[in-house]
Structure formats: C-alpha cells, structure tokens
Image (cartoon, rainbow, N blue to C red):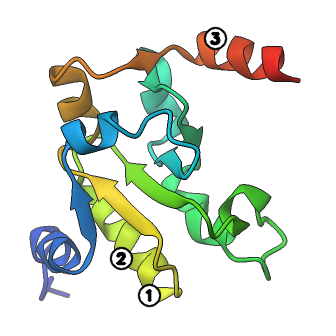
Amino acid sequence: MPITKGFRALVDEAMAEVTTYSVEQVRARVNDANTQIVDIRDIRELGDGTVRNAFHAPRGMLEFWVDPASPYHKKIFADESKEFILFCGAGWRSALAAKALQDMGMTNVAHIDGGWAEWVKQGAPTETLEDQKARRSAKT
C-alpha cells in the first residue's frame, strides 16, 4: 500500500498547529517553576545527557502518562499551572507529540525547535542522567 502522506507532511501540519519555542526562549525558562521541560526521546538516546531539569517521558508512553484515565498516568502531567515543553532529537517527534497532546485537550503544551541537536549546538544547559539522579535524590 503506498504512503499517501509522508512524515514530512505530518510534521509540517503539526508545526503549523503547535507552539514552537526557540532554544533561546526555553533556555530562559529552564528554572521557571511554571515550566516543565519533557524529554520524549527513547531511553537509548539519553547517553549524552538531557536538558537540565527535564522529565523523561518516552514518546511511546506519552499519551498514556498524560491521560488521567490511563493506568499509566503520571501525576506530573496533571499540573495545569505548568506549560509542558517537549523535545526530541531534531524537533520532529516533539511537534507530532505536542499536536497529539493538543488533540487530547491540552492547551499548555509546546515544543523546542530543533530539539536536542539544536539545544546542544547552542550550548544550552545539560546534565548527565547520573547528575539528574543525584540532584533529585538531594531534594528528597
């Protein structure tokens, strides 16, 4: 069966409908209590680290973790006072994911243009998974 709409068309459609922030815009909000950065990359992509203070929610589980009716729901996504800013490797999956969450009814969702690659290229703050675990352990 031939593909009638390719991934690029899907990404372009999503980009036209979701809020997209530059790395610079998100970098200014990394420590903002009303912002939750969400890393939707696969666990195998996290070897080089993640955005400082990001919450990891793998793309394959995102809708299940967001939906309060799901047995997999994560309470972090129930905080309506936060804006959830998603990122992936290049900004394609995060655009599609932000669109899916909007389709679910979320209005407080956006994504980072260029994703992790652009974040690193611009020298924005990162942390290793070990640093992240240590920081979180220190809070408890």
Q: Are marks 3 and 1 in contact (CB under 8 Å)?
A: no
- Tell me the number on the disc at residue 130: 3
Q: Identify the residue position indicated by label 2 in the image.
A: 99
Q: Position of residue 20 (x, y in %)?
A: 23, 61
Identify whether 140 is placed above or below 69.
Answer: above
Q: Identify the residue at horizontal 58%, vertical 44% (top origin).
A: 33
Q: Earlier in the sequence, mark 3 or mark 2?
A: 2
Give the side of residue 7 with respect to residue 124, left or right: left
Q: Identify the residue position indicated by label 1 in the image.
A: 103
Under circle 3, the secondary element is helix
Q: Identify the residue at horizontal 81%, vertical 22% (top origin).
A: 139
Q: Are marks 2 and 1 in contact (CB under 8 Å)?
A: yes
Spot the residue most to the right. 140
Q: Earlier in the sequence, mark 3 or mark 1?
A: 1
Q: Categorize mark 2 by other alpha carbons within 10 Å: few (<14), some (14-19), many (20+).
A: many
Give the side of residue 66 with respect to residue 73, left or right: left
Identify whether 66 is placed above or below 46.
Answer: below
State the residue in front, 22 or 68.
22
Marks 2 and 1 sit apart, C-alpha to C-alpha, by 6 Å
Marks 3 and 1 sit apart, C-alpha to C-alpha, by 34 Å
Q: Categorize mark 3 by other alpha carbons within 10 Å: few (<14), some (14-19), many (20+).
A: few
Q: Position of residue 96 (x, y in %)?
A: 32, 69
Give the side of residue 140 with respect to residue 91, left or right: right
Under circle 1, the secondary element is helix
Q: Identify the residue at horizontal 18%, vertical 69% (top origin).
A: 11
Identify whether 5 is placed above or below 122.
Answer: below
Identify whether 37 is placed above or below 28.
Answer: below
Q: Amino acid at mark 2?
A: Lys
Tell me which corner region of the image, top left, top right, bottom left or bottom right, holds residue 114. top left
Q: Amino acid at mark 1?
A: Asp
Q: Are marks 3 and 2 in contact (CB under 8 Å)?
A: no
Q: Amino acid at mark 3?
A: Glu
